Image (tube, helix red, strand yellow):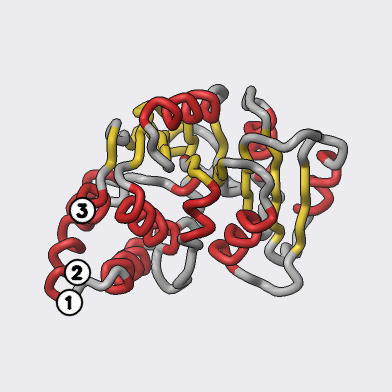
Amino acid sequence: MTQPLVSVVMPVYNGAAYIKKAVDSVYAQDVSLELLVIDDCSTDNTKKILDSYGDKSGFRYFRNNRNLGAAGSRNLGVREAKGKYIAFLDADDWWAEGKLREQLELLRQTGSVLCSTGRELMNPDGTSVGKYIPVKEAVTYRDLLAHNSINCSSVLVKREAVLRFPMEHDDSHEDYLTWLKILKHYGPAAGINKPYLKYRLTENSKSRNKGKSAVMTYRVYRYMGYNILQSAVFFVSYALHGLWKYK
């Protein structure tokens, strides 16, 4: 295929139950793309399901020799990508049609390097929870410190930005940390307030493990260089937003 405009990076670990819906939603997008699936040592039928996509244009499968975790797998995908833009999609989430095209157009209009969308919360069986999480049209660095409104599976970002600021520190929310660094360096992110992302609340998702998620969020502020008091203030804001988001 010719060089794709967008490289979709999809980490997966034992995602056989959900990954087909995720992959199909990628190929329903009407833009030039490639899909890089990074298999983090799955032990289920993930590879067997993915074999049926081997003849799809731009489909690329990688299997880690050792478990790298979500951050390491995403970083590998970014390094191997050929597109100008990177879109992240977890294997248990999926997109509505038209997502990438509208994001590309908004990035061109605004000059931003990163764009996220709103998300609809879904049950493990794929039915709607009946809750929608909005996103602002412009998300500043200060906005993001107070509340992480950027979900990883909704992001379209210039590859140069995530090469400069790869995901690190698995003991924190590594994606949140990367978004903060990108916005601090490049300026505000663009937002599309539509439910283009269908976000599945699985039993192992961070959103289900509130205590662990809280600790990981606090560590993000510390890794960004804020002192204990500053980090505590940001954490209180995070906690209040979290009560509203998942009530």
Q: Which residue is mark 1?
A: 228
Amino acid beneath label 2: Ser
Q: Secondary structure at mark 3?
A: helix
**Residue at point 46% right, 48% down?**
152
Amino acid beneath label 3: Ala
Horizontally, is 121 left or right of 153 in the view?
left
**Residue at point 49% right, 43% down?**
157
Q: CA distance from mark 1 to mark 3?
A: 15 Å
Of residues 109 and 189, the one drawn nearer to the viewer in this rendering: 109
Q: Is any atom of residue 71 visible in this view? A: yes
Q: Which residue is mark 2?
A: 231
**Mark before the other along the chain sequence, 1 or 3:** 3
Q: In the current view of this chain or complex, which residue is farthest to the bottom?
A: 228
Instruction: Classify the position of the N terminus by image quarter.
Output: top right
**Residue at point 28% right, 44% down?**
245
Q: Which residue is mark 3?
A: 146
Whole-percent x, y for residue 89 in the image: 56, 45
Q: Secondary structure at mark 1?
A: helix
Q: Is any atom of residue 243 visible in this view? A: no
Choose top left, top right, bottom left or bottom right for residue 226.
bottom left
Whole-percent x, y for residue 175 in the image: 44, 57
Q: CA distance from mark 1 to mark 2?
A: 5 Å
